[in-house]
Amino acid sequence: MALERSDVEKIAHLARLGLCEADLPSTLDALNSILSLADQMQSVDTQNIAPLAHPLEASQRLRPDQVTEHNQREAYQAVAPAVDSGLYLVPKVIE
Amino acid sequence: MHQLTLAEIARGLAAKQFSSEELTRALLARIQALDPRLNAFITVTEALALEQARAADARRAAGESSPLLGAPIAHKDLFCTRGIRTSCGSRMLDNFEAPYDATVVEKLAAAGTVTLGKTNMDEFAMGSANENSHYGAVKNPWQLDHVPGGSSGGSAAAVAARLLPATTGTDTGGSIRQPAAFTNLTGLKPTYGRISRWGMIAYASSLDQAGPLARTAEDCALLLQGMAGFDPKDSTSIDEAVPDYSATLNDSLEGLRIGVPKEYFGAGLDPRIGERVQASIRDLEKLGAVIKEISLPNMQHAIPAYYVIAPAEASSNLSRFDGVRFGYRCENPVDLTDLYKRSRGEGFGPEVQRRIMVGTYALSAGYYDAYYLKAQRIRRLIKNDFMAAFQEVDVILGPTTPNPAWKLGAKGNDPVAAYLEDVYTITANLAGLPGLSMPVGFADGLPVGAQLLAPYFQEGRLLNIAHRYQQVTDWHLQSPEGF
């Protein structure tokens, strides 16, 4: 099932990607081309085959619940676009 | 001096034939003179390199001696380096200086390596030609109007042009092995979990793995030794002892069972590559290996499965780039949604945006089972194929790529045409297996690589086979004209 222009707009919104109008047709073509490649999977019989998420099937390690990191707020905020008094600044969210 | 391998440099430094500072100055001058033709570096770290070289010379003068002490290298620009830009080839991170070093960077610095710079790459490691970089395409030193492969294209072009002896790269679907094949290098993607991913900017977390690129297997062994090992900071790092990779380089290949998958020599393979790979098989037979035809019946399904799993993981990983905490922020956002959308729309290039959207779609309600889970089921079929094959053979050998390097711009705007070139490399990432590409000849002046795959954690075996092959062949010694 091929995507339509409105599908691309919806996906871009879900991904919070601002696409320019002019790029929409070429993006639509590219996504349809990629998804028709992906659709080749549907011909493969995978009945009774469990999904493989980790190639070595390892599970996440647990560690003791101890503090291992110290506060480095200043170092981390030094690379932020806009901060004030230790806070990240964004456009006003609440009226 | 620029022709020296890492192993030769280690011997020269130990014998006091030259200092690390002299070598570093010579290579920095060479980068300055020749890199404008290649665009292999995004950042050259001259001050850091000279400081590290002098420190390495001081450690040697104090009696220390280890193979990587004073050895010049460069890092792919997705390994975080404290205080030095880590761009990931993206406008999004053009202004980003990481507040910490990646584990790989830290380990290699502790071993005494000298960092000459950060190498160019496809944006967020998404690409097979190094044409998707915010900093421009990288040129292949063998033919400057051809691509060097990707995504570790800068790492490969720099070593191939003898700007330095070795570099780090990362491989999510072939991004070390394919550029190694395109530029006549030896490149190794280790077992998933062998090298820490901490501080490596994530593309597809269940597939990404770092590794070395160098001219010889011997050098890859030296660099891998400095990179490998358990890291508690990476939750997918595997706690498995690291063997001495140099110690087994010369092991005999007598009786080694090499499996050659019949599917690797089907339609789509450039016959010149098929012929070179067959010749390498005959050379390995002369060294005592026994060849056996095998089958990997699900190989053909790997590309569609990979191009669902990798974008799905990317869409999740790249959600952190929001214009708030670090990286690019658009001008004058009117509200928070506008801030997110324009920062990401302006900060990411077209291929990254495509993969984020494919991944977002594949993970969205109603499509998850048909795309993501289906791809993960195929992933198990591919792993099962390898596990069955390794019951019969010790390693697997075939071409690294179906075609040699293509001309810059030749794949145009069709992303799928480029995806199909990854057919031989992506299965190792899906199964988490170690893989190595080594030079086995040329097709009309362009390098050809053969790929070896081994069971988990048998990087030493791959390096051993490539080293023995390089003792009886001289393909890896050929250098591109003008470099």
Image: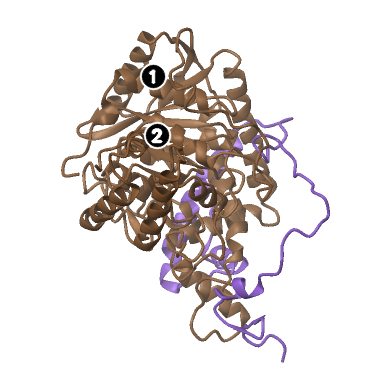
Chain colours: A purple, B brown
Q: Residue at x 59, y 35 (%)?
A: B432
Residue kind at label 2, given as amino acid type: Asp
Q: Residue at x 29, y 25 (%)?
A: B271
Dot 1 crowding, Cα within 10 Å, few <14, some 14–19, many 20+: some
Q: Does any portion of residue A45 appear in the rendered image?
A: yes
Tell me where residue B306 sits by quadrant: top right
Q: CA distance from mark 2 to mark 1?
A: 13 Å
| B4 horizontally vs B375: left or right | left
State the image coordinates of residue B297 (x, y, percent, origin top left).
54, 23
State the image coordinates of residue B149 (x, y, percent, origin top left).
35, 44
Residue kind at label 1, given as amino acid type: Arg
Where is the N terminus of chain B found, in terms of image quarters? top left
- 2 and 1 marks on the same chain: yes
Tell me where residue B137 sits by quadrant: bottom left
For mark 2, what is the residue?
Answer: B219
Chain under disc 1:
B
Where is the C terminus of chain B found, in terms of image quarters? top left
First reached walking from the N terminus: tag 2 or tag 1:
2
| A64 horizontally vs B317: left or right | right
Q: Does any portion of residue B121 appear in the rendered image?
A: no
For mark 1, what is the residue?
Answer: B468
Query: In this view of the protein, which residue sits in the foreground, A17 or B121?
Result: B121
Chain under disc 2:
B
